[in-house]
Amino acid sequence: MKLYDYWRSTAAYRVRIALNLKGIEATHEYVHLVKDGGQNNLPEFKAINPQGKIPALVLDDGTALNQSIAIMEYLEEVYPDPAILPADPVARAQARAFAMTVACELHAINNLAVMKHLAATFDLKESSGLDWMTHWMSLGFEALETSVARRDNDGPYLFGELPSMADACLVPQFYNARRWGVDLDAYPRLRSYDKAARAHAAFAAAAPEAQADAE
Ligand SMILES: N[C@@H](CCC(=O)N[C@@H](CS)C(=O)NCC(=O)O)C(=O)O
């Protein structure tokens, strides 16, 4: 398998975590999101992912998958052991909901293409981009903190004793929040899950700083 990757891409970071958790070896093809006006916008990469977004996972038969959540679901179906979703159907739905809140609600409106379009189209103050990101991340984290507080969970990870797809979404989003200086004090439960997951070898090896293309 080949992962089209970029060290700072939080969506690629999710997939790196999932691959590591499952012990799957993949080669990495690095696509720089800033250099050359974004190498992700070049026709060579759009031939792999027409959306021009990282990550893409190319399977050994040449099939290209995109969208980090879909890729993680694929990995879970084809390589079920170890699982990255809880066994209980309710907990599975909750873990998926957590992952989707990050990927579809929080990250989707804070990613590079959205920020570039906002800056290029509207007459915004210099601080507006940061305000925008902080606003949507804080709303999302607030809801996630409340939802985890409502569930019984004695484990160190979001869904018990084993890290799941939900942890694979939380950690990259917290990395991104820290990068932009978003205050995380109000989310003690999320901070504790993030800390526990970052101490896990699969998460540590997937961290942006540990990637070969990190600058
Ligand atoms: N929903 C997509 C998001 C993919 C995405 O936005 N990737 C970012 C990096 S984190 C990207 O490639 N951005 C380039 C751009 O938007 O121009 C997923 O989960 O895979």
Image (cartoon, helix red, strand yellow):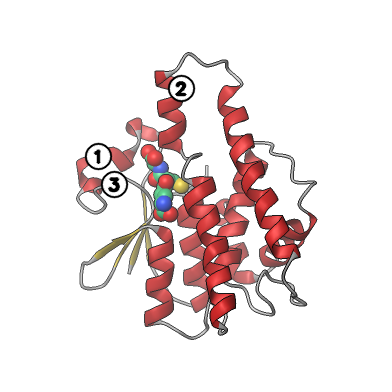
Classify mark 1: helix, strand or loop. loop
Mark sitting earlier along the chain (2/3): 3
Residue 212 in view, yes or no: no
User: Does the numbered disc 2 mark a residue whose Cβ is under 8 Å from ligand 1?
Assistant: no
Classify the position of the N terminus by image quarter: bottom left
Residue 32 placement: quadrant? top left
Tell me the residue that label 1 is attached to. 42
Q: Are marks 3 and 1 in contact (CB under 8 Å)?
A: no
The one nearer the camera, 213 or 63, is 63
Where in the figure is residue 92, as x and y percent of width and height?
Answer: 54, 76
Q: In the picture shown, does residue 89 fall above or below 110?
A: below
Where in the figure is residue 14, as x and y percent of width and height?
Answer: 50, 60
Classify mark 2: helix, strand or loop. helix
Q: Residues within 10 Å of mark 2 (few under 14, many from 20)?
A: some
Q: Residues within 10 Å of mark 3 (few under 14, many from 20)?
A: few
Q: Image point 22% across, 67% down: which residue?
A: 63
- For badge 3, the amino acid type reads Gln
Q: Image point 58% across, 72% down: which residue?
A: 164
- For badge 2, the amino acid type reads Ala
Label of residue 51 in the image: 3
For the residues marked 3 and 1, what is the alpha-carbon distance in whole angstroms?
11 Å
Mark sitting earlier along the chain (3/1): 1
Label of residue 119 in the image: 2
Quick check: 73 left or right of 90?
left
Where in the figure is residue 145, as x and y percent of width and height?
Answer: 71, 56
The mark closer to the camera, 1 or 2, is 2
Q: Image point 67% across, 62% down: which residue?
A: 198
Mark sitting earlier along the chain (1/2): 1
- For badge 1, the amino acid type reads Leu
